[in-house]
Image: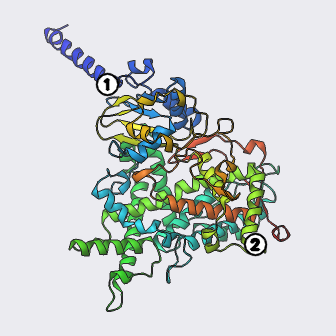
């Protein structure tokens, strides 16, 4: 060995050793963790990746670590050179975090639409982004059948869901009693709906498929009646294809162990760049259309007179015009912020809802007593003359059991298995120090939500936050552990002083839409769509139970928590049954 090598080698070894030590996990004192993982550079990541490889899920593995370590709060080491990630499985503390501790924990960035309000800290830019679309969650836009001369959400949702029922009528006739998969159809319905609500124009993915299937004289069918029939697919228009590419890119990003790097690489692919460019062009064109409608007001009218609202972009440009006037600046109708708000509106408004509705099909088919009870109540409410309920009837009707079915669907689906927040400064959680910048996952599909919360009583009261202790009597009660994992809408029903059934939204914990200021912006629209879907589905069809081999409840994680299997066999509700 040369003298130079002998001189340099100790420095190289020291540098490598220093780098190795820096890459090792640095546990947060006091919070339980896997001891062996703290001695590995990759920490818990290999175990998580292996579970993902075997089961296609990660959030259930994360939830299970609390049970393995017998603690409502644990830390996992998922990335080298990074702080640990903290996970809690206690519904009461999670509720306190999202409702009362916004100054301690802000929204974490796990969504890659850079100018959308969702990725902003809770600041003025966040508030500006939310204000642009605030009117789209107002009662006048969501629930009224008409807003002057413009269609709004309720009739739009009804129209596209009925179009889905028509598609399934074509498929049911062709299937001749065989099961078929509805997941992609539901996704297309949700995309058609949110596109129409957003832009007031037709995407036509369902209509394209209906016309395509009607033109086919003979389908390839499996010999056995218990085998699912696979229907051929049409060629969709470029807008539909672009949305599919971009949604898939988000799926890949959020499920990657290195999401930022994955997102950067995806942006380099020709398919992504082409889809994004087309999406940007479409959104700019729709914003330009809305601007033209605003600027074409009659002489003597002002911005507040722009009331012929046909879609969300109309509201957005009106809001921007009002803000520009107030701030004495030129309006920016097609700013990057406006474009990303609309894209987020499209993504958030179709993929999550479609996933929940896909689970809903499974729940309804496997619980015929729920389906039958709901159908009977709907017939009593809307009349049994076989006339499909109107948008106004569905959106304004007071049907506690329908609300209970929808809420139970959301609870059991687990579409969003976790709510994520980041510590904005050094703080505490369940008596443990949480350093600034640490991500905290509130697991929303495990203990207390879908399984018994065995550690809840073991949490010392003094370790809870001050706001949690002060609001102890207002905390949402836990579910009965004996049936917490069952699909049972009746858990949401209670009897009032007059002996009437009422829907109790606070019957037990649920975290599918987050909560507080950073809760899901589109929650009201999502519930409205689920309410319309369940009503029109049960009104139109009986869902028969599919063969056991097609009935599994295993899932896979992408942008949402989706079922691996979803098939259905439909039987149209006959007129005499509705009379």
Report the side of 284 relative to 491 (left or right): left
**In the image, farthest residue toward the right:** 576
The residue that mark 1 highlights is 23
Where, by quadrant of the figure, is residue 73 drawn?
A: top left
Image position of 53 with respect to 486: above or below: above
Give the SS element for disc 2: loop
Q: Quadrant of the N terminus?
A: top left
Circle 2: is it few (<14), some (14-19), or many (20+) Cα within 10 Å? some
Circle 1: is it few (<14), some (14-19), or many (20+) Cα within 10 Å? some
Q: Which one is in front, 497 or 504? A: 497
**Residue 489: x and y, percent?**
68, 50
**Residue 207: x and y, percent?**
62, 70
Instruction: Kindly identify the residue that appears in the image at 35 percent across and 80 percent down.
Output: 304
Image position of 569 with respect to 395: above or below: above
The residue that mark 2 highlights is 383
**Residue 85: x and y, percent?**
40, 33
Q: Is residue 577 visible?
A: yes
Instruction: Kindly identify the residue that appears in the image at 36 percent across and 64 percent down.
Output: 131
**Residue 286: x and y, percent?**
41, 73
**In the image, farthest residue toward the bottom:** 299
Give the SS element for disc 1: helix
Instruction: Kindly identify the residue that appears in the image at 69 percent across and 47 percent down.
Output: 488
């Amino acid at each position: 060995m040369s003298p130079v090598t002998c001189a340099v080698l100790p420095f190289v070894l020291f540098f490598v050793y220093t780098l190795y030590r820096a890459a090792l996990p640095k546990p947060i004192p006091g919070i339980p963790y896997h001891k062996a993982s703290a001695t590995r550079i990759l920490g818990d990541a290999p175990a998580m990746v292996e579970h993902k490889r075997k089961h296609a899920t990660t959030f259930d593995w994360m939830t299970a670590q609390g049970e393995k370590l017998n603690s409502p709060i644990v830390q996992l080491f998922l990335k080298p050179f990074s702080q640990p990630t903290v996970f809690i499985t206690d519904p009461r503390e999670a509720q306190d975090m999202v409702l009362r501790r916004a100054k301690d924990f802000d929204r974490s960035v796990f969504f890659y639409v850079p100018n959308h309000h969702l990725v902003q800290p809770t600041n003025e830019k966040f508030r500006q982004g939310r204000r642009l679309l605030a009117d789209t969650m107002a009662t006048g836009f969501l629930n009224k059948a008409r807003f002057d001369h413009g269609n709004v959400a309720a009739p739009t949702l009804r129209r596209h869901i009925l179009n889905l029922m028509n598609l399934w009528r074509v498929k049911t006739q062709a299937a001749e009693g065989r099961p078929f998969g509805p997941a992609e159809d539901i996704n297309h319905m949700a995309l058609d709906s949110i596109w129409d609500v957003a832009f007031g124009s037709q995407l036509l993915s369902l209509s394209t498929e209906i016309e395509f299937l009607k033109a086919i004289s003979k389908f390839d069918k499996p010999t056995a009646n218990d085998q699912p029939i696979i229907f051929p697919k049409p060629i969709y228009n470029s807008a539909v294809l672009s949305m599919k590419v971009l949604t898939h890119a988000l799926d890949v990003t959020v499920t990657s162990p290195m999401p930022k790097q994955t997102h950067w690489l995806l942006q380099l692919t020709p398919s992504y760049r082409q889809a994004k460019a087309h999406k940007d062009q479409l959104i700019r064109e729709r914003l330009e259309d809305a601007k033209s409608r605003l600027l074409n007001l009659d002489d003597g009218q002002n911005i507040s007179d722009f009331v012929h609202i046909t879609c969300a972009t109309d509201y957005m440009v009106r809001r921007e015009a009002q803000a520009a006037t107030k701030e004495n600046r030129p309006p920016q109708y097609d700013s990057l912020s406006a474009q990303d708000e609309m894209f987020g509106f499209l993504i958030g408004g179709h993929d999550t809802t479609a996933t929940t509705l896909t689970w809903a099909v499974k729940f309804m088919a496997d619980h015929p007593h729920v389906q039958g009870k709901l159908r009977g109540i709907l017939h009593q409410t809307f009349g049994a003359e076989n006339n499909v309920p109107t948008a106004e009837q569905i959106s304004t009707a007071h049907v506690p059991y329908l609300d209970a079915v929808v809420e139970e669907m959301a609870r059991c689906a687990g579409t969003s298995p976790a709510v994520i927040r980041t510590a904005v400064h050094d703080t505490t959680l369940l008596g443990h120090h949480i350093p600034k910048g640490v991500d905290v996952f509130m697991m929303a599909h495990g203990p207390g939500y879908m399984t018994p919360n065995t550690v809840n009583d073991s949490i010392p009261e003094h370790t809870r936050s001050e706001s949690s202790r002060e609001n102890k009597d207002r905390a949402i009660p836990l579910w009965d552990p004996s049936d917490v994992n069952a699909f049972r809408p009746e858990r949401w029903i209670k009897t009032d002083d007059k002996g009437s059934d009422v829907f109790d939204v606070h019957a037990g914990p649920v975290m599918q839409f987050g909560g507080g200021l950073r809760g899901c912006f589109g929650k009201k629209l999502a519930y409205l769509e689920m309410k319309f879907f369940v009503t029109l589905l049960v009104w139109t069809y009986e869902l028969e139970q599919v063969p056991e081999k097609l009935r599994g409840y295993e899932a896979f994680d992408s942008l949402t928590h989706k079922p691996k299997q979803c098939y259905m066999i439909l039987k149209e509700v006959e007129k005499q049954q509705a009379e």
